[in-house]
Each structure stands twice: as structure tokens, then as C-alpha cells.
Image (cartoon, helix red, strand yellow):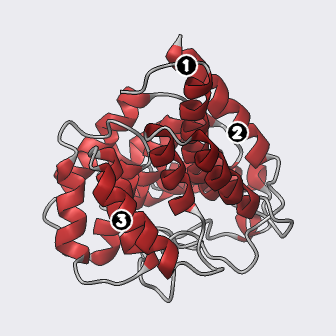
Amino acid sequence: MANRSRNRVVGQVFSRICQAGRRRIGPRRAAGNRGGEYPAAFSREPAPVVEWHPDSHSQAHQWNQAIIAINKRIQEAPEEPRTQAERGYTLAEQAEWNEATAALAEAIRLGTDSPVVWFHLAIVHLVRHRPDEYAAICAQMVDRFADTTDVGIASLVSWTCALGPNAVRDDTRPLKLANHALAGQETYWFALRQGALLYRCGQYDEATSQLQRAAELSSDEDWAFHKIFLAMLCVRRGDAAQAQRYLSEAEGRMVQPTDRIKWIERAQFAILSAEARALLAGVHRGAALE
């Protein structure tokens, strides 16, 4: 019953935010793409790792034509993982979740070395309410990139594991990865990742401290992810009113009337917002939190 209720909330929030598909958060960039700080993780056009819709069809958002062009390239080079990844991204933009899942999984099977593919597939699983599959992808990412010293990859892996509960059996592994690779960075995104991962580890006091630090470091270019995690912390501490305020402030920033938001951006925000709303709904029903 709890899972069905949460799935309903996720669907409602995702649908509402997807309806803002012709909007964007003013001059804000996708998470982490600040002066190339995390190019592998959250760039709007992550060319350093995977060419994002390289043909003019995609750039014009003519998705059907883009799929035709990509399918032709797959026929010509069926073992090329990057083309399969592009197909998965384009299908996800159209909310074709089953086909997007298959294409992204095929890119991984073909040996892609891009963590962006795992990241997209993890989010597709969360959108489809498939927590076990999401957890499996997170475990693969942590195992595959555990020894990385690349800032962008460490950032992406740790953030992927923070997007949903129970991402990996040992919640401290993504936190250790982030701390090792990103130590000493005094940025909003580093504080956010630390706070989010500490929250997932159940270290609520430390999480609050880091998320409050993220709030101090935030600017108009940054998304309000920290407020969603602060909302969830407030729920767990019994302050539903403050949780609602944080959540309303975060969602208010998401739906500003500007231009178009990519699905990957809408999805991250919707997933976390829905989780927070499900926690709040549980409190209002008198449900006990773990």
C-alpha cells in the first residue's frame, strides 16, 4: 500500500513538472555545470562524455526524425555504444521509457565507458518506479568507478546514488567516493552531495549541517535541491510545517516561466520532490517513519 501511494505521488509530481516542459530555470544551468566544474555529470550539452543529440533534428527537438537518423547510424555500426546511448536519451525525451531502458542497457552491454549512461538509466528506473533496478545500476556504478579520481565522474556517481533511497547496500561507499575525489571543494554542489549522501546514510545532524552550508553557497544559478533534502529532514524531525515551506520554495523555483527543460532535469527534480511529498503525506496520515 505504501509503495502504491508513493508511486501515485511520484506520478502526480512528475506529470505536473513535465507540463512545464517549455520552461527552464532562467539562467540556471543543469546541476554541476558551472564553468566546466562537473562536465561529465550535469552539463546541458555533455559533449565531453557523450555527444548530446549531435544532428540538427535533435537540436530542433524533432524527436521522431532524430530517432530515424540514429537508427540508421545503428544499422551502419550496431556495436557502437555511443549511438545506442543517444537513442536512449532521445527516447527518454519523448517519455518512451521501455525503449529508452532497452537502448541505455544495450549501450552498457556494448561496453560504454561513460558514467552518464548509467546515470540516465538509473533515472529512467526511478521514473518507472523500479527501485530494485535503480539500486542495481547504482551498485554497478559504484563498483565500476570506485577508484576514479576524476571530479566529474565521482560527482555523478555520488549524486546518482543520492537520488533515491537504498541505492546501494553499503550507503557509505558513495559518500567515501565523493569525499575522496571532491575533498576540499567549497562549492554548492559539493556541499549538496555531501548533505544528500549523509541523509541517505541516516546521519541527519551532519546532513543538516552540509545542506545548510549548501544554502549559504547557493546562488540564483543553482537549483534548490538542498531545500528538498532539508524538507525531508524536517519531516523526519516532526516539523511538517517547515518541511512544507522548504518544499514549496523549491518547487516554486522549478516552474518559473522560461524556456524548455530537458527530461533529465525535470526528472531529477520530480523524483526528489515526489519523495518528499510522499514523506509528508505519510505524516499527515499518521504513518510512522523509519
Q: How many marks?
A: 3
User: Which of the two marks, 2 or 3, is nearer to us in this view?
Assistant: 3
Examine the rendering and report whether any part of residue 222 can be seen: yes
Badge 2 is on which residue? 13
- Figure check: 45 above or below 230: below
Marks 1 and 3, how far apart in space?
A: 28 Å
Examine the rendering and report whether any part of residue 76 can be seen: no
Q: Are marks 2 and 1 in contact (CB under 8 Å)?
A: no
- Amino acid at pointer 1: Gly
- Amino acid at pointer 2: Val
Near mark 1 (Cα within 10 A), the count class, few <14, some 14-19 or many ≥20, is: few
In the image, taking residue 114 as reference, residue 286 lies left or right, namely: right
**Which is nearer the N-term, disc 1 or disc 3?**
3
| Closer to us: 206 or 9 | 206
Q: Who's the residue at 27% across and 51% down the image?
A: 141
Question: Could you say which quadrant of the image residue 117 lies in?
Answer: bottom left
Q: Are marks 1 and 3 in contact (CB under 8 Å)?
A: no
- Amino acid at pointer 3: Ser
In the rendered image, residue 212, in percent from the top left (x then y), is placed at: 44, 68
In the image, taking residue 257 as reference, residue 26 lies left or right, namely: left
**Which is nearer the N-term, disc 2 or disc 3?**
2
Q: Who's the residue at 51% across and 16% down the image?
A: 2
In the drawing, what numbered circle is on residue 209? 3
In the drawing, what numbered circle is on residue 286? 1
**Which is nearer the N-term, disc 2 or disc 1?**
2
Q: Quadrant of the C terminus?
A: top left
In the rendered image, residue 49, in percent from the top left (x then y), is placed at: 42, 71
| Closer to us: 133 or 237 | 237
In the drawing, what numbered circle is on residue 62? none
Marks 2 and 3, how far apart in space?
A: 28 Å
- Label 1: which secondary element: loop
In the rendered image, residue 174, in percent from the top left (x then y), is placed at: 24, 55
